[in-house]
Image: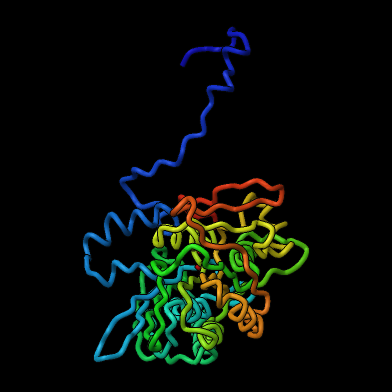
Amino acid sequence: MSDTTDLPVSAALDIEAWTCPAPLRDRPRVVMGHGGGGVLSAELVQQIFAPAFGGEVLAQMGDAAVLSLGGARLAFSTDSYVVRPLFFPGGSIGDLAVNGTVNDLAMSGARAAYLSCGFILEEGVELDVVTRVSEALGAAARTAGVEVATGDTKVVEAGHGDGIYINTAGIGLVPAGVDLRPQRVVPGDVVIVSGAIGVHGVAVMSVREGLEFGVEIASDCAALGGLVEAMLAVTPDLHVLRDPTRGGLAASLNEIAAASGTGVVIRERDVPVPSAVANACAILGLDPMYIANEGKLVAFVPREHADAVLEAMRAHPLGAESVIIGEAVEAHPGMVVARTGLGGTRVVDLPIGEQLPRIC
């Protein structure tokens, strides 16, 4: 390495020539970002899984697959939960395992009916912990009105797990006339968020890292089936719903924009971010738009129905803080843009990896 100590400052420190390289994406091995719901996750699915599995149903790439079977329309979804720690303010891995899958079904308009449940236990985990998680899972299922109908248990050697991992799959019926998918989004659709974002991720992080922010931040983990039913009671002509989990609200908006071929414009000041979450994110250097939620949804609604749908959402306990944050537009198709409080705009891009791993 050459010695620059004798060079003029302007030559030794050519600041204008500095660059900030993008993260390397041509990787031979899996990295944490592949599970983050962002660009790396999408590449993993599109370049490895989708070509290997094939099929028209998989190509829908929704939160749940909608299937025709025996004259009925079924929604079918599966998800795995690897949250750390297992218990956090507002919930546990057991609550997540139920609510996450119920919500994936709800985003297709389906009312969840049955779940499967697979436990992967690490050798040495306390049976009291397994009991607490199981009881939380059962209570969440009863609250959501869904039955755990089948399951499986595996044990791995000590050091080859993280206490407990859970997989759940669910099925439910999609009502006639309901067709929720991003391809139905058109310019003019109104974007509604059902409440404050970023709460779940910050709640988990605060416990994991032993952080205190002056007030307790509890997860928003909840089953959204009842809220979706209230929205569909106004009109079945909702265009798309998403629960912004991995990758947060930013990832969901980008996925919808890309699939629909429309642009999305949001008003940054209208996005509901609690002050406690905003303060925590400022300290940690995070953006609330990219943090996972577990009890919120984002809806694209035809403008003529937006006011009535918003009123119905606000009348439901899980949608009391619902707010309109933007709209779909013809300009910049496939791109999400935020209008800032200072009158400027910024691109809200799909995250490369994941700000907070292992939170869902």
Quarter of the view holding residue 209: bottom right
At x 66%, y 55%, the residue is 281
Taking depth in this image into account, of 301 and 149 the one nearest to the observer is 301
Percent position of residue 99, x then y: 50, 80
Taking depth in this image into account, of 26 and 104 the one nearest to the observer is 104
Outermost right residue: 214
At x 28%, y 54%, the residue is 47
Quarter of the view holding residue 196: bottom right
Percent position of residue 278, x then y: 70, 58
For residue 66, side relative to residue 106 (left or right): left
At x 45%, y 65%, the residue is 186
Percent position of residue 124, x then y: 45, 73
Q: Is residue 87 above or below residue 33?
A: below
Outermost front residue: 304
Res. 140 in view: no
Percent position of residue 102, x then y: 46, 81
Res. 98 in view: yes
Marks counted in the figure total 0
Q: Is residue 63 above or below residue 145?
A: above
